[in-house]
Amino acid sequence: MNTRRDFFQKLLGAGLGMYSLQIPETLRLLQSESLKSPGRKIIATWNNQKAVEAAWKVLSQNGSALDAVEAGARVPEADPEDTSVGYGGFPDRDGEVTLDACIMDHLGRSGSVMFVRNIKHVVSLARRVMEKTPHVYLAGEGAERFAESEGFPKENLLTEKARKAWEEWLIKAEYKPKINAERHDTIGILAQDHLKNLSGACTTSGMAFKMKGRVGDSPIIGSGLFVDNEVGAATGTGLGEAVNRKVGAFSIVEMIRQGMHPQKACRKAIERLCSIQDYGEFQVGYIALDHKGQIGAYSLRKGFQYIVVEEGKIKLFDSDYHFH
């Protein structure tokens, strides 16, 4: 016996069936893919393939975005061939390698260390600051003492390659920030995990042959890195002084909050740098990842690359740029 309820269920079903026939096939495929995808994604500056592989290994096992960005950043920190991050980083003008790093999670927590000597994995030290102290920033000797209390080994970070480069620099002792001809620099890395949570990390040895005590944008929350889990995350690479003056990462996230796509937000942030005239031909590149999983990247000049991992597939891109 058919009831009124049976009648309306059949009518509703027929209506939905008619509607589904009108949905474009491409949209149906997109909907299907979005249901299959757990939303995991990574984006990092430069061609840091081994770094994003390490980060993806964490995400693929349903690890957190925070664990992923830390694992990724630790890779170049341990690479003696990377002359702008960690072990192997070029020293300051006194011949001493000093490192900066920061990390930020989906809860809005952040930790940062700067002017750190003899500690290789400063991104992990920054995470300890975030999780085990009431502070955000620790610098110099204080950060080193904290590292010792946390069991971080002290290591000589000056490689033979870096020492020779410093000795050659001493001949003229000229400090001229230049465009990244070697296609690498600070690593900034952003990730979204299976729970749609965002985190980011940034680590560097700073500008080669810098003045002792110089700190760039990389460990500065809001300049070199910013994460808002409800909006998005951004990080940058290049001349830190320029990024600091425009509070780059925070400005990108705020533009995303106002409804901009991450690509447009990165471009707008780069355009703001054009008012800076006193740094010569410097380079800055930004990357961003919003809470929807959309990405963006843009640089001031040609040459900046970024790398993306989505569902295990790694792709390297040349960024769009402002000056043609």
Image: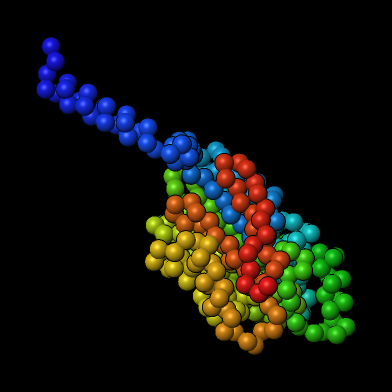
Residue at (84, 72) in percent of width and height = 165
Residue 80 is situated, as x and y percent measured from the top left of the image, at: 78, 59
**Farthest residue in the bottom direction?**
278
Q: Quadrant of residue 167?
A: bottom right
Residue 181 is situated, as x and y percent measured from the top left of the image, at: 77, 69
76, above or below 138, in the image: above
**Farthest residue in the top direction?**
1
Q: Quadrant of residue 76?
A: bottom right
Q: Quadrant of residue 171?
A: bottom right
Given residues 158 and 253, the one toward you in this image is 253
Residue at (48, 40) in percent of width and height = 26
Residue at (69, 84) in percent of width and height = 280
User: Which coloring applies here?
Assistant: rainbow
204, above or below 313, in the image: below
Q: Judge from the rendering whether residue 314 lies leftward or rightward of residue 32; answer left or right.
A: right
The answer to whether residue 297 is seen in the rendering is: yes
Residue 231 is situated, as x and y percent measured from the top left of the image, at: 41, 59
Q: Judge from the rendering whether residue 178 lies leftward or rightward of residue 204; answer left or right.
A: right
The answer to whether residue 158 is seen in the rendering is: no
Residue at (53, 72) in percent of width and height = 269
